[in-house]
Image (cartoon, helix red, strand yellow):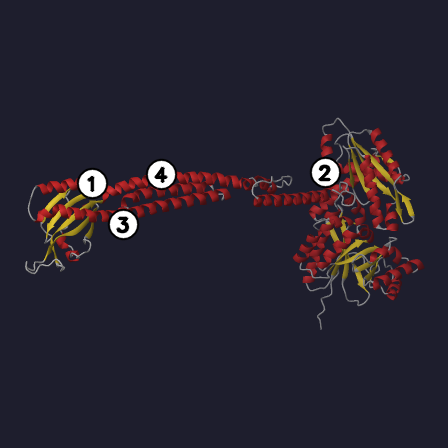
Amino acid sequence: MLRDRYRSVAVWFQELKSRVGWATARLARQNSQHSLVHRLLAVLFLTALFVYFTVNIGLWWTSSRLIEENLLKQAGRWITELDAVGTPLYASRAGYQHIRVNERIRNFPEISFVRYYDVSGRRVLGEYGKTAGLKLTAPASLDLASLAPNAGGERPYLIVRDSSGGGTLRLIAPVYVRAIRSDGMLNFSLRKAQAEEIKVVGYIDLGIDLGYYREALLRSIAQGSLIIAAIFLLALFVGYRLIRRALAPLTNLQAPLLQLAQGDTSVRVTLSGDNEIRAIGHALNTTIAAIHQRDEALRHLADHDPLTGLANRSTFMREMEREHALMAEGGHSSAVLYIDLDQFKYVNDSYGHAAGDRLLIKVAEVLRSRIRDTDMVARFGGDEFVILARHVDQKKVMEMAASMNALMSKISLVEGDQTFTINCSIGITLMTSNRFTIEEVISQADMACYEAKSRGRNRFHAYEFGTEDRKKIMSDMGWAQQIKTALREDRFQLVFQPIQCMSPKNCDFYEVLLRLQGADGQLIAPGAFLPIAQRFGLLVDVDRWVISNAFKRLGEIRRAGWEIVFSINLSGQMLDDPDLYEVVRAGMLANQLSAGSVVFEITEQTAVRQIDKASQLISQLSELGCLFALDDFGKGFSSFSHLKDLPVHFIKIDGSFVENMLTNPVDQAMVESIIHIARVLGKKTIAEFVQNQETIATLERAGVDYVQGFHVGRPTELPAMKKKRATS
């Protein structure tokens, strides 16, 4: 069997297989991160191994078959020669015959032995070659009938593969003689074909040593395998270099992508390699550039005022913290200039917020051009600006303030056929150490600006460290600390003022108002602490506290089975809070508040001053089911012109018109005009500051929808609610 022929190389292949498996496992461990280059190299390596083994196995198989076929052909010729040489054995026992056979087979080392058997196939007539120790099966035990001579054909023979004989291939062929049958001398004729008689007289047993060829074959295959292995190693090396070179541009993308993943958007990819990789690099550069631009825009929006492009409050406060830290080292002084535009409200109310925005942009340009590279200017509020002037003394900062007053007075704004100028009041405080906190420094500059306004506007004033001012600063700081404590310890309290429905009179509608619980237990009105909360940047936190607690209380009441609507005030700073939408959405979801149960109030001045933000906020929260009311409506000169642009649901008529409408015909006409226009626009109206029943009757005749005031109900804890009416 062929399986016997491969037995000698099985161990060699097994050892090679184990070495390949070890190398593959090591490669897998080294490339546990699944590198594309390593994957391709592994595929190349495994493909080469597969081809290598396939070539070697194919070489072994085909070589063995060819050798065996050639041996069988050669064995046929050997048997013919040995038949001729050994024929005398069947006629005589001449000794020289032994010499001839031995000399003949000595020339062929692959012939292991030759035996001549008699016609029975049992008795050996002659034995030559290496037969010692061999246990050979006699031909008599084989199928000798198949060896019958075929007249005119090739000599038949049996093939016996005797593995016990050391891998010997035996060929057993008949020895026969040919004779012409005698018909008598008188009948002999040359023209007539004579019958030939073939007679088997014995058998030749030819043994071929396969080990001789096996060793030669193994040597040849080993040499060929080494050559093939060298060729494949060279191919692997060339393939490795080609793959590394082709994928080097792709591999080089790892470092830029890692930097990008860590937030570095300044990285750029070098374009190289094939067209496909260059296209990937170009796409990455385009994407990184877009991300970089987006991040720069977001950082700019986070640190700058979107209207003027100046630094915003938070950026200025961070810069103040760094400057305050430097003050501990001493050796220089800096100053803060607090700038407030004079009569800016007149411009905004007379010509609209668009004109006011253009004016603010011009002011920002003037301030930016006036400061030095080491200074910083920021927009602190609506029409308030602050400047941090570094390394200046009292005289230098006074000169800066005087120059700014002069520059501001030269600013002119043309609106239609109107041209007007703007002035400013400037408050100055000098920092020579870190004795005061940042909040105290800002408060000092603010107080100095207030003093400049009180002395006639369009001037500057330096803060004087007097006893009264110190007390005022300490008072403001005390209020700020008290507000922070109230936020942290829930010391605020909500009270609720009823809003009465005129028709039908069956709804429960309350405005949520805020009170601060003082140290003595008394409730403090918001007018005492909200301006300070705004000055110290705490107003957003206060608004969030109100929203959270009002939603919680409203959810408890509505789940108890009572219908009720809460109206909650929003400050102007909440329009700049990017998390307001999510705060409201999460609060309504957590407290199971339905659509129409929450009304948010924003003042007319806040809405008009930031009409784009207000409109966007109203639209977003309206999608959640919230309603909106425009508070203090009627104070501005441009109220009616902007009313159609704000998608509010309620208009709260300013109380200054309502409380005197019985005695002032102009106020009454204003109230009636607001109600009429609101009805045309499909909006509900709420009249504030209702003091008596006569005012309610007059408002009802005018068509007002809701009334609110001390006559209707004072702010207090919620009274007992009426249970929800069952629908019929």
What is the secondary structure assignment of the residue under circle 1? Answer: loop
Cα–Cα span, label 1 and label 3: 22 Å
Cα–Cα span, label 4 and label 3: 24 Å
Task: Assess disc 4: are there few (<14), some (14-19) or many (≥20) residues with their C-alpha within 10 Å of its C-alpha.
Answer: few
Q: Is mark 2 in CB contact (under 8 Å) with mark 1?
A: no
Task: Assess disc 3: are there few (<14), some (14-19) or many (≥20) residues with their C-alpha within 10 Å of its C-alpha.
Answer: few
Identify residue for label 3.
2
Q: Is mark 4 in CB contact (under 8 Å) with mark 1?
A: no
**Residue flagged by tag 4: what amino acid is it?**
Leu
**Residue flagged by tag 1: what amino acid is it?**
Pro
Identify residue for label 1.
109
Q: Please state the horizontal and vertical placement of residue 286, each as a whole percent of the image.
A: 64, 45
Q: Please state the horizontal and vertical placement of residue 622, each as a whole percent of the image.
A: 73, 58
The answer to whether residue 393 is above or below residue 356 is above
Identify residue for label 2.
318
Q: Please state the horizontal and vertical placement of residue 496, each as a whole percent of the image.
A: 77, 57
Q: Residue 226 got which mark?
A: 4
Q: Earlier in the sequence, mark 1 or mark 3?
A: 3
Q: Earlier in the sequence, mark 2 or mark 1?
A: 1
Which callout, 4 or 1, points to the residue nearer the camera?
1
